[in-house]
Image (spheres, grey):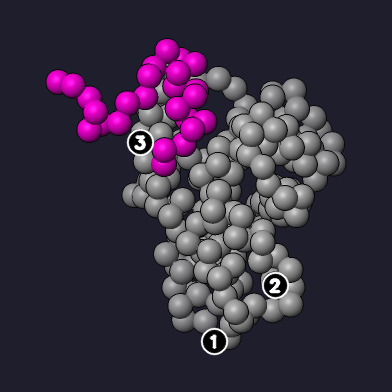
Amino acid sequence: MANRTEQLITGVDVREYFQGALTEALDRQCVPVQDETVLYLTNLLASFVRSEQLYDHTPDGVMIRPLVALYGDAVNARSVEEEYRALQRLGDLALFVSGLFAHSLGRSLVDVDYYIAMGGNAYASIAGSERLSRTRRTLRAVFSELAERFVAVVDVLAEVGEAGNLQTSHDILRLYEIWLASGSPRAAARLRQLGIDPVPAHRRTH
């Protein structure tokens, strides 16, 4: 993975790289999605490689806007298009961050399960609407698939973005916390590879 990351940094076509990496990860994890969803995810990853697409200028500085703020934008939108633009941004950010930066969420006020819930609900709201523009109607099946398989796609993105093996006890503990919060099959599999059998807290014996 490190070599492929270096290739990406030194000039390989970004979309080509991500499409190949996504296809491989989807196959390895046996996550069947339609070609349109692969294309959507490829464009999402390629877009967020550019920091100006990921970060917003806010009164508090350049940052990734909180999901609750994006939800507020959707609730207070002055048009249907504005509402669903905010929901799509919310879903995309939640998917990207929970997939590629889940470990860093342990240092924030919210955890990966919050991102998964917010992102899945945002995509579901778009997919279930009868007021979509023509462009978004063509993506209805994509949004529906992302909503239904949000955790599975998070696992796929985690594999795509992973640059190396876990090295510290803190990383292992954080991986276990991610598994507890999201039920991620991939997190469970990685724990087992490390010799740890993930068991829900309520099943532990004392």
The vertical placement of 43 against 81, above or below, is: above
User: Which amino acid type corresponds to the residue marked 3 in the rendered image?
Assistant: Leu
- Disc tally is 3
Q: CA distance from mark 1 to mark 3?
A: 39 Å
Q: Position of residue 140 (x, y in %)?
A: 66, 66
Residue 166 vertical position relative to residue 71 in the rendered view, above or below: above
Type of amino acid at the residue the image marks with label 1: Arg
Q: Is residue 11 visible?
A: no
Q: Secondary structure at mark 3?
A: helix
For the point 36% across and 50% down, the residue is 110
Name the residue beneath numbered marker 2: 137
Residue under label 1, please give it: 78
- The kind of residue tagged 2 is Arg
Question: Can you say which quadrant of the picture contains the N terminus?
Answer: top right
In the depicted structure, whether residue 19 falls above or below residue 56: above
Which residue sits at x=61%, y=72%?
Answer: 85
Per the rendered image, the range of residues in magenta is 182-206
Label 3 sits on residue: 180
Q: Position of residue 67 (x, y in %)?
A: 46, 61
Q: Is residue 17 magenta?
A: no
Q: 1 or 123, which lies in front?
A: 123
